[in-house]
Image (cartoon, rainbow, N blue to C red):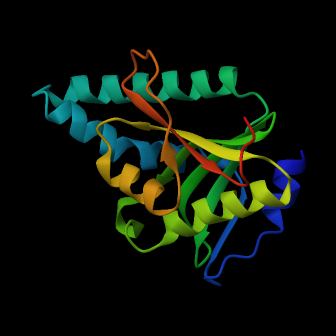
Amino acid sequence: MLVYRVLSGYQFSDPCLRWRAAGTGDASFLKGLFDPDSRSMFRSLGLPPEMIDIMVAQQWLARQTAYAAQYPEAVDLIILYEDTPVGRFLLTQDGDRLHLIDLMLASHIRSRGIGSEVLTAAQVVAADMGLNRVTLCVAATNSSAQRLYQRLGFVVDPPQQSADMTITMTYPTRPLHR
């Protein structure tokens, strides 16, 4: 896939940062990235630990199944810092846009500029590929991610009818002609 070939050649400004294709051996790492945030949400509801385990496992399976069904051509990358897995970046090309499906970073590595580097790479790659825009969806309650995206030039799309409580944001790689 062209997106993967272009991404694999990208050089980050931080020499400790790189990415590689995700494989079947990364399943437990990926679930481990997902667990802490999901568990804290269920803990806040006062659920017992056994029920939280079940809910997190079901939510993870549902998420992975939905991504595979909705984005069969997605590129799944493991983000490495000093050759240690620290995150996941899942994205796909859809017509004239690069759509960012999922970006997860381990909690101990957040707020160190890695998310900004990864998103900037997506913006550069989309422009290099001649795509018009980069899009993503973010939870309406995730204000820290929204601030990061806005700082990098993403703008909130007009509100849409949506029951899933997400906000769609777009980064135009070049002026859009309407």
Q: Is residue 83 above or below residue 85?
A: below
Q: Residue furthest front?
A: 178
Image location of residue 79, percent across then percent down: 60, 62
Image location of residue 64, percent across then percent down: 57, 29
Residue nearest the viewer, comparing 7 with 156: 156
Q: Does 125 sit left or right of 120 as displayed? A: right
Which residue is rendered at x = 76% and y = 54% of the image?
126
Image location of residue 159, percent across then percent down: 43, 26
Which part of the image, by quadrant, shows the C terminus?
A: top right
Q: Does 144 sit left or right of 81 as displayed? A: left
Q: Is residue 97 above or below residue 118?
A: above
Image location of residue 88, percent across then percent down: 57, 52
Which part of the image, by quadrant, shows the N terminus?
A: top right
Which residue is rendered at x = 43% and y = 47% of the image?
32
Q: Is residue 148 above or below residue 32?
A: below
Query: Which picture quadrant has residue 75?
Result: top right
Which residue is rendered at x = 67% and y = 64% of the image?
121
Residue nearest the viewer, comparing 57 with 18: 18
Q: Is residue 170 above or below residue 163?
A: below
